[in-house]
Structures are given as C-alpha cells and as structure tokens.
C-alpha cells in the first residue's frame, strides 16, 4: 500500500520542487483524495510568478478532481459521497455556519483555500499539485461521473466561472445580448454558458495571432461575432451588430488591460450590466461615475464561484463531454508543472491539466 505522496511544492516565486509527504489520515470528518487531474488557470500563473503572495512553502493547485480514497463517517454523511466516488473539489473552504454558507453561496468567513494553505498547516497536502490531497471538514466536494476523462472533469472550474460570471452575476435572460472580452478558458466557458441559456447575440474579443484559434473556437461554441481587436474595433463592431443600441451585458475577463473597461462602457446599453472578472492590478483613470449613474448602469465584480454554479458545470460536463472537451488542449505530468504554467503564460494553450 502506498504510504507517501509526491507533491510539487512552491518554495518561492518561480520555484517548484518535487517533495514527498506522508499520506494523511482522513479522520471522522475529513477525507483523502487520490488526485487524478488538476486544472491550471491564470491564478496559478500569478501565484507562480509571485504576483499573488503566498505563505511558503505551499502545494499549489485549486482545481482538483479525483477519487475518494478514504473518508470518515461524518464527512460521508455531510457530503453524500463514499470511498471510490469521483469528486470535484471547489477551492474555497467554507465555515458552514454563516448565512451565506447556509444558502449555498460563497462563505463570508472562509478559513482558507485549497492550493493556498502552507505545508506548515497540518496535514500539509492542501493543493492539487500532488498525488493525494486532504479534504477537511470545511471542504465541499461534489460528486461527478467517473465515466469521462479526468482532464475533462477538471474543467469544472472554468465552466463554473462561465455560469457565475456570464449568467448568474448579470442575470442573463434568454433573448439578451452579451459581449465577452477575452477568449481564454473562462471567456470561452462564458460563451458556452451564455449560449446554453439562450442569449440572442454573443460577441467575443481577442487580440492578435495567438488568439485567432481561440476566436474560431468561440464561434464554434455559438458566438455570433468574433472580433480581433488588433485590426478591428470592438466598440464599432458591437454597435454595428446591435444597430447602435449596445449590448445588455458585458463580461470583461481580460487581465491587466484597462482599455476593455472603457470599451465596455461604450458598448453596454443604457440600463445594462458590466461584469468585471479580470484582475487589473491598477485603478482605472477617468472612470466615469456620472455617466454610470445617468445611464443607470450596473457594475458587478466577481471572483469565486458558488456551489450552485459548480453543480451547473458538473451537469454540463456530464451531459455534453464532447462539447466541453474542445476547451482542453494539454496534459502535463506532475513533475512538469512549471512547464505547464509557462505554456499557459505564453498563450499557447487554453485548458491545461496536470495528470498524476
């Protein structure tokens, strides 16, 4: 019986080391997950580079899917899963006591996040860049079928974000129009989510040659217009396609770039909604507060994904695995975690997973 787990440990910015740890005990109210795959996203890139500070050393990885190896009786009753079940593991730990937790929403007093707790917090294996991962009483695993490839199951996180950002946050209704800035994994997932609820027009923006294939993929997912902003104006294209009325919803998933926020204000119709999902790292100069008030615009910020939208993602993965699989581009071994992150940084992949 295997008694130790391999894990990639981040010891500082840009440094990942393969280390071994004892496989934890589940206890009565916890579980041990045999990790099959772990997705990689822009947050992993930012933490790897040190842009998002961590308490080192830490086992990264907050998009894990795997098989329950051992589970305590209390945890099994609370989560509705047993040993041998495949589950996805939402990143955020939940206190289980606050009103938001009771309603099934994001915890208002989260005790931590998978992939961010340091190894000094026992039992160390809190992240998905590992063979095994500890699930605490505050974890919230969700069962998913074991009949599909684990790399596809690991797409629960971007797909959950797609539903949370493009549908839930703006209350997108059938027949409404939406512009999605950025064709990364969450932008493309937003296209899938918007299409699934009956959006009438879907516009997607990208930039340059490296986004060309992603824009083509957006069109295959149901986008009505893919705009390469290296050569075309997103504002002009969206206004022309809506007869000058503007769109009902804009979702900005782009990181760092500030121009998309100004474009969103020009594209959205009076009374429309702008969802800010991309972290910029800077304030936006000239933010037109008076215009927002006079045009009755709603501005929403989003970050974490709640349980309901993870369940929507799981349902989509289980019913349409071939559709979802088009998001996935690369698998890497655990030891090649740094290479996987750099590939994402270069824009050469969309959904990338580590396989253990």
Image (spheres, rainbow, N blue to C red):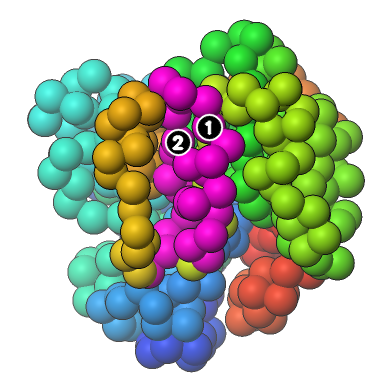
Write down the residue under mark 2: 274
Q: Is 192 covered by the magenta stretch?
A: no
Write down the residue under mark 1: 268
Residues at discs 2 and 1 in contact (Cβ within 8 Å): yes
Q: In the rendered view, would you say 119 is above or below 91?
A: below
Q: Is 264 covered by the magenta stretch?
A: yes
Q: Position of residue 209 (x, y in %)?
A: 86, 67
Can residue 4 be seen by looking at this rendering? no
At horizontal 48% and vertical 41% (from top left) the residue drawn is 265
Magenta residues, as a range?
257-281
Query: Can you tell which quarter of the image residue 220 is in?
Result: top right
The Cα atoms of the two marked residues, 2 and 1, are separated by 7 Å
Q: Is residue 127 left or right of residue 143?
A: left
At horizontal 67% and vertical 59% (from top left) the residue drawn is 353
At horizontal 37% and vertical 69% (from top left) the residue drawn is 281
Which quarter shows the C terminus?
A: bottom right
Q: In the rendered view, would you say 300 is above or below 318?
A: below
Graded by Cα atoms within 10 Å as few (under 14), some (14 to 19) or many (20 or more), the crowding at tag 1 reads many
Q: Position of residue 245 (x, y in %)?
A: 62, 22
Provide the secondary structure element on which disc 1 rests: strand
Depth check: 186 or 276 in front?
Answer: 276
At horizontal 64% and vertical 74% (from top left) the residue drawn is 345
Q: Position of residue 286 (x, y in %)?
A: 35, 59
Which quarter shows the N terminus?
A: bottom right
Q: In the rendered view, would you say 261 is above or below 333?
A: above
Graded by Cα atoms within 10 Å as few (under 14), some (14 to 19) or many (20 or more), the crowding at tag 2 reads many
Q: Position of residue 322 (x, y in %)?
A: 84, 32
């Amino acid at each position: 019986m295997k008694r130790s787990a391999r894990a990639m440990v981040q010891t500082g910015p840009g440094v990942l080391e393969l280390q071994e740890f004892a496989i934890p005990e589940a206890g009565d109210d916890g579980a041990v997950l045999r990790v099959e795959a772990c997705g990689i996203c822009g947050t992993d890139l930012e933490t790897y580079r040190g842009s998002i500070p961590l308490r080192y050393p830490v086992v990264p990885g907050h998009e894990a899917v795997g098989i329950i190896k051992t589970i305590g009786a209390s945890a099994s009753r609370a989560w509705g899963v047993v040993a041998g079940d495949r589950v996805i593991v939402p990143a955020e730990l939940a206190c289980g006591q606050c009103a938001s937790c009771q309603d099934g929403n994001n915890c208002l007093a989260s005790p931590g996040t998978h992939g961010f707790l340091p190894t000094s917090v026992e039992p160390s294996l809190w992240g998905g860049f590992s063979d095994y991962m500890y699930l605490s009483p505050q974890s919230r695993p969700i069962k998913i079928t074991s009949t599909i490839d684990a790399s596809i199951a690991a797409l629960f996180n971007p797909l959950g974000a797609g539903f949370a950002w493009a549908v839930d946050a703006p209350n997108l209704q059938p027949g409404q129009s939406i512009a999605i800035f950025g064709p990364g994994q969450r932008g493309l997932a937003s296209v899938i989510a918007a299409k699934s609820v009956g959006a009438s027009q879907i516009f997607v923006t990208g930039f340059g040659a490296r986004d060309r294939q992603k824009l083509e993929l957006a069109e295959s997912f149901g986008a009505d217009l893919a705009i390469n902003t290296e050569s075309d104006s997103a504002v002009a294209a969206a206004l022309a396609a809506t007869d000058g009325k503007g769109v009902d919803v804009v979702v900005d998933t782009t990181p760092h770039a500030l121009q998309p926020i100004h474009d969103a204000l020009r594209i959205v119709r009076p009374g429309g909604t702008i969802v800010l999902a991309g972290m910029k790292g800077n304030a936006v100069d000239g933010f037109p507060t008076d215009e927002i008030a006079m045009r009755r615009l709603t501005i929403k910020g989003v970050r974490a994904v709640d349980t309901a939208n993870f369940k929507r993602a799981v349902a989509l993965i289980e019913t349409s695995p071939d559709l979802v699989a088009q998001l996935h581009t690369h698998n890497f071994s655990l030891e090649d975690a740094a290479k996987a992150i750099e590939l994402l940084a270069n824009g050469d992949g969309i959904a990338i997973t580590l396989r253990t």
